[in-house]
Image: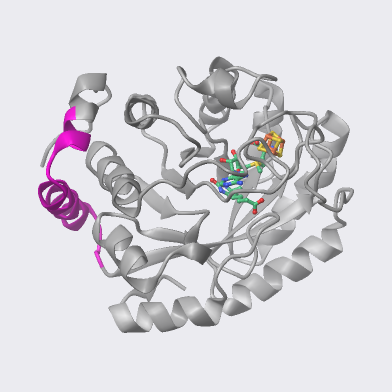
């Protein structure tokens, strides 16, 4: 079996994008089969533990304080509310519970309030994941001690396109946090958003940056932009379905052992589109009616789709 590579050249990733669709997807599916059960999809539930009023200016986000998106701001949820949500998610069949906060970075005080949430979810027998913005090395170690399994921190877009999307932090800031997370021994969940008006070279560059991390992220969320009214990206021309499937296929080929998550954007995708994403190598979804601030297919809808496709979840 081919070794895991961390030295992808941009031209090599661009050459994958240039392949005929059938050749690319066949190659991706072949890699997928060698490394995973192709009929198994992992399910993660998401819960927003702190909503809105974020000081960052990410042009895609409903929760940035810079844009008028009509979002209802909410302070950090209580441990009780979070654990109640986690219980519902577990009963519905989610195997991982991801908690998100609209922060640039947590203060040590706010982090101390997240710790019992991580401990509580873990005690329920689910995998734990949080996404809280930038972390210091000490904060990453605190989360590790609490038993955190995964930290989600997306590269979001290419280094070259970064300043067109976010001006309040740099691409390198993201890399620094990923390093702190990895040094602490927490598994890394990192991916990006596609369909923000970026070029194909940006898509190739971002996937390359992920694949050239050593080790590869354990989990790679591939988000299709959910256009949010009031944000600078509300009217961006949507990405074609075939181009999105290509991004999944290439993520699978260049990060053969990572779990690739078909993340935001599923609400607008039909059965055949999702089926092709799973065929191209996606083997995880966000499961449950809500993402952070936008809707996601219901668990019933997903169960019906999985039954049609003969897909098992690992619940
Ligand atoms: N504030 C933290 C951060 O930015 O890392 C954690 C929460 S943030 C909402 C988590 C991720 O959600 C972002 O990195 C981005 O990839 C994704 N996201 C946010 N808004 C989105 C949208 N409208 N469409 C698709 N993905 C989105
Ligand atoms: C990720 O890559 N996607 C999730 C999660 N990590 C935190 C977030 C998707 C957000 C979609 C828009 C919203 O619901 O606000
Ligand atoms: Fe804040 Fe995260 Fe939204 Fe950016 S993506 S505005 S950091 S919540």
Q: Name the quarter showing ligand 1.
A: top right
Residue 10 relative to residue 196: left or right: left
Q: Is residue 106 magenta?
A: no
Judge whether 254 appears above or below 304 on screen.
Answer: above
Res. 15 image quadrant = top left
Q: Which is more toward the observer, 14 or 104? A: 14
Instruction: Locate residue 226 relative to residue 73 in the image: left or right.
Output: left
> Main SS type for the magenta part?
helix
**Percent coordinates x, y for residue 189 in the rendering:** 50, 41
Q: How many marks?
A: 0
Q: Residue 84 placed where, x, y %?
A: 77, 70
Q: What stretch is highlighted in magenta?
A: 15-38
From the viewer's side, name the closer residue of 146 and 22.
22
Q: Can residue 213 be seen in this view?
A: no
Residue 238 image position (x, y, % from top left):
46, 47
Residue appearing at x 50%, y 79% in the figure: 301
Q: Which residue is drawn at 57% across and 36% down?
A: 153
Q: Which residue is drawn at 47% across and 73% down?
A: 315
Q: Position of residue 113 (x, y in %)?
A: 84, 45
In the rendered image, the vertical position of residue 53 relative to residue 288, given as above or below: above
- Eyeballing the image, is 85 above or below 114? below
Viewport quadrant of the N terminus: top left
Is 37 part of what is drawn in magenta?
yes
Is residue 280 among the parts visible in the rendering? yes
On screen, residue 160 versus residue 23, left or right, reads: right
């Amino acid at each position: 079996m081919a070794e895991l590579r961390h030295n992808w050249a941009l031209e090599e990733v661009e050459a994958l994008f240039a392949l005929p669709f059938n050749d690319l997807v066949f190659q991706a599916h072949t890699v997928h089969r060698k490394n995973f059960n192709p009929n198994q999809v992992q399910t993660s539930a998401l819960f927003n533990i702190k909503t809105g009023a974020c000081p960052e200016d990410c042009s895609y986000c409903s929760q940035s304080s810079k844009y008028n998106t009509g979002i209802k701001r909410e302070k950090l949820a209580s441990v009780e509310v979070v654990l109640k949500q986690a219980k519902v998610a577990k009963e519905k069949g989610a195997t991982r519970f991801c908690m998100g906060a609209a922060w640039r970075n947590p203060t040590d005080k706010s982090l101390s309030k997240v710790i019992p949430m991580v401990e509580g979810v873990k005690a329920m027998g689910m995998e734990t994941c949080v996404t809280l913005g930038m972390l210091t090395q000490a904060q990453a170690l605190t989360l590790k001690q609490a038993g955190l399994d995964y930290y989600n921190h997306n590269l979001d877009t290419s280094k070259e396109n970064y300043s067109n999307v976010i001006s309040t932090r740099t691409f390198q800031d993201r890399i620094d946090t990923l390093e702190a997370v990895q040094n602490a021994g927490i598994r890394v969940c990192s991916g990006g958003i596609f369909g923000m008006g970026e070029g194909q070279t940006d898509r190739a560059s971002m996937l390359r940056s992920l694949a050239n991390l050593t080790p590869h992220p354990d989990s790679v969320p591939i988000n299709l932009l959910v256009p949010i009214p009031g944000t600078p990206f509300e009217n961006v021309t949507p990405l074609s379905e075939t181009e999105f499937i290509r991004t999944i296929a290439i993520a699978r080929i260049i990060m053969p052992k990572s779990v690739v998550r078909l993340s935001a954007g599923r609400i607008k995708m039909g059965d055949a589109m999702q089926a092709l994403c799973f065929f191209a190598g996606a083997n995880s979804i966000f499961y449950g009616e809500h993402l952070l601030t936008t809707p996601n297919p219901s668990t019933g809808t997903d169960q019906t789709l999985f039954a049609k496709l003969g897909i098992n979840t690992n619940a």
